Amino acid sequence: MANQSTVYLQGKCKWARLQAPDQWGNWKLNLYPTSDSMATFKELGVENTVKRDDDGDYIALRRPTQRVVKGKVLGLSPPVIVDKEGNPIEGVGIGNGSDLTVKLDYYSYKSPQGDSGKAIRLAGVRVDNLVPYNPSNDYPEELKKVVGKLNEQPKQQELF
C-alpha cells in the first residue's frame, strides 16, 4: 500500500476483542494511551475521535476482517499478538487494565467521492503486562443484566 507507515502507541486497554471479531467484523480494543502516545495520536490528523469514560480518555482501535479494493473483497488477517519478549501468543484473553504497545498502519486514502485523508488500522499488539481476562470483572454490566441467571439454568438434555 502506497503512503503507509507504522506508528506505535502505548497504554492500558479495555474491551479487547482480538481472539474473534465482533458482530460488525472487526477485531478491536479501546486504548487508554500514555500522555506521550496521546500526543503522538493527536499529531496524526486522523478522524478517529478521542472518547472519555470514568477511566479517562481512550481511542477505539480496530482492524476489519476484510476490505474492498478496486471492487474486490480482500480478507485481512487478525492482528498479531505477542508477549513482552516478542513470542506469539494465542488463546489468551486480554483483560481490562493490561498494558499494551499497539502497532498501527498509518496511511493516506482517497474515497470514491474524491475526498482524501489519513487513517489508522490496528496491525499488532504487544502485551507488556497481562491482566488475564476475568468475566466477572471484564464483562459489561449491561450484558450481565441481559444474561441474568441464564448460565445457572440446567443444561439441555440430549434427545437422541
Image: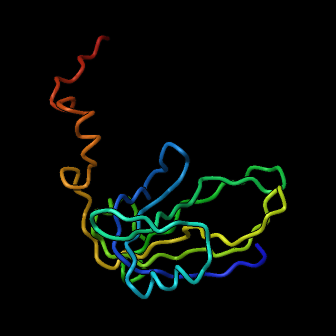
Residue 108 in which image quadrant: bottom right
- Quick one: quadrant of the C terminus? top left
Residue at the bottom extreme of this rendering: 36
Residue at x-position 27% and y-position 63%: 54
Residue at x-position 16% and y-position 23%: 154
The image position of residue 57, as x and y in percent, is 38, 70
Residue 83 in which image quadrant: bottom left
Residue at x-position 66% and y-position 81%: 5
Residue 23, placed above or below residue 67: above
Q: Between residues 87 and 71, which one lies in front from this camera angle?
A: 71
The image position of residue 126, as x and y in percent, is 42, 76
Residue at the top extreme of this rendering: 160
Is 119 on the left-hand or right-hand side of 116? left
- Quick one: quadrant of the N terminus? bottom right
The image position of residue 116, as x and y in percent, is 77, 68
Residue 125, placed above or below residue 6: above
Is 156 on the left-hand or right-hand side of 30? left
Residue 134 in which image quadrant: bottom left
Residue at x-position 64% and y-position 76%: 106
Residue 140, placed above or below residue 51: above
